[in-house]
Amino acid sequence: MRNAKPYEYLEHTADMGLKVFGENLTALLANAAQGLFETLAVVDTIDETVSVHIHVTADSVEELFVAWLDELNFRHETEAIFFKRAHVRHCSVTEVAADVYGEPANFDKHEVYTEIKSVTYHQLQVVQAPDGGWFAQVIFDL
């Protein structure tokens, strides 16, 4: 279950997937956010000039995982911000509160990879291992 990298890309026809790892749920959510940010753009081109507070609740850990990534993508799209980093302040299997850092979109500066239309439930997995670590798999509709 342990992996040296916090996430890896998952091959999927026409879409994009992530396998995410974390030693606890907080790390899993932060690593998933990082995977999303790095799917959208080259994070090295993004400075941390703004912070946005994100608070999401859901009925299950699977719904929370999707709602978290969906909210990050929604804020990216609607507020025209590229995010570089997420700091998860509090989380449980039904709630996450975090601050995300980035800067307003600047297409002369930011190197953009793709746009994510939605975070899907297709092949979704969010699992806690016997050792306490977490694993998740998610597919993005591009």
Image: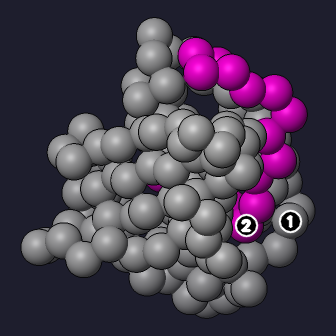
Mark 1, secondary structure of its residue: loop
**Is 88 left or right of 40, judged from the image as shown?**
right
| Residue 16 quadrant | bottom left
Residues tagged 2 and 1 counted as in contact (Cβ below 8 A) = yes
Residue 87 visible somewhere in the drawing = yes
Which label sits on residue 84? 2
**In the foreground, 16 or 134:** 134
| Residue 42 quadrant | bottom right
**Measuring 49% from the left and 25% from the top, which residue is drawn there?**
61
What's drawn in magenta, residue-wise? 74-95
Mark 2, secondary structure of its residue: strand
* Residue type, label 2: Lys
Q: Label 2 crowding class (10 Å Cα cut-off): few <14, some 14-19, many 20+?
A: many
Mark 2 to mark 1: distance in Å?
Answer: 7 Å
Q: Where residue 99 appears, x then y in whole percent?
A: 81, 41
Which label sits on residue 48? 1
Which label sits on residue 33? none
